[in-house]
Amino acid sequence: MEKNSCIYVAGHTGLVGSALVRSLNRNGYKNIIGRTHGALDLTNQAAVEDFFAKEKIDYVFLAAAKVGGIGANRTYPADFIMDNLLMECNVIKSAFRHKVKKLLFLGSSCIYPKLCPQPIKEEYLLTGPLEPTNEAYALAKISGLKMCSYYKEQYGANFISAMPTNLYGLNDKFGSNGSHVIPAILSKMEAAKRLDQPAVKLWGTGTPLREFLFADDMADACVYLMETYNGRSHINIGTGRELSIRDLAELIKKTVDYKGDIVFDPGMPDGTPRKLLDSSRIEKLGWKAKIGLEEGLRLTYDSYIRSLRA
């Protein structure tokens, strides 16, 4: 990418999109545009087409998505598959029609089978059944990455895809039904601390193993891929390190300085038992994660406290 290129970050106010904007700024890219959902509904094909016709965009980071944790995915599966498919189809089609130089599509590690060999290589995609609790979202993301691959195959479009592991960081959704595991636990423990509650109840058994990546690390990887990678296969982005949800909860408890107990509810779903990405491909390209989990949790917690005070 040229430093003065017009770069559109779809979803620029969210966890992923805002991290991308920060990374682009750190790397000297200043001509960055974004639109809030109120200004541009990406599920509206005509509106997206009009936007691309007017803005003369050179590069696209497609980070916009309808996202949520297990609870939201179980409750609204039709919305998750429909909204995400519409956004992907509209942006990718308009990017192609208006001769965007390159597009990067952001997926999710939930695209892989529930009982996948570990660590998960890119070629394990579509080798088994998906985790039922987020199948709708996963199917939409699989369709998006395949769409990019097919546009490259049929038309030669320079559309690539990146599949990050579980993300957390600044501008995440805290304390809502749509929260992912880290912001959900962090906001629960902060509330329990303020109210002097003796215990915090968490979903599941605490035994599933997860890998977590700080969103700003993910964003740096995406900018790096946009600058260096043109292959047809999607690329995993992870840290190569995992821990149990129980150990994660203990780390968050330490970060928040909560003194109460942690109680797990085995009657609630765990999700996939283990999910560790094989990130050797991107590491061979020259990128590696820099921010450890303890540092990332501290940065996330400090940001959350600032938002509460504001």
Image (cartoon, rainbow, N blue to C red):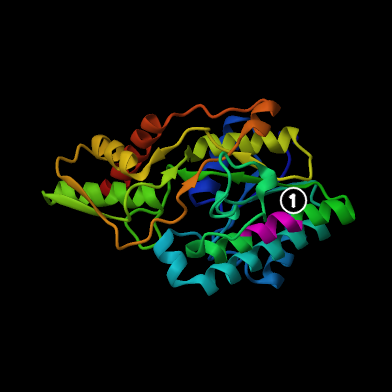
Q: Residue at x 72, y 34 (%)?
A: 227
Residue pictured at 20% horizontal, 37% vertical: 257
Judge whether residue 98 can be spotted in this image: no
Left/right of residue 250 with respect to residue 131 in the rendered view: left
Give the camera-side residue of 269 and 77. Answer: 269
Q: Quadrant of residue 31?
A: top right
Asked if residue 220 is positioned above or below residue 166 in the image, the reply reads above
Left or right: where 19 falls relative to 255: right
- Amino acid on which the number 1 mark rests in the picture: Ile
Q: Main secondary structure of the magenta part?
A: helix
The location of residue 71, given as percent across then percent down, is 39, 64
Residue 101 appearing in the image = yes
What residue sits 29% from the left and 39% below the top? Answer: 252
Q: Which residues are magenta?
A: 141-147
User: Magenta stretch containing residue 122, yes or no?
Assistant: no
Whether residue 142 is in magenta: the answer is: yes
The residue that disc 1 covers is 57
Residue located farthest toward the bottom when viewing the structure as drawn = 78
Residue 292's image quarter?
top left
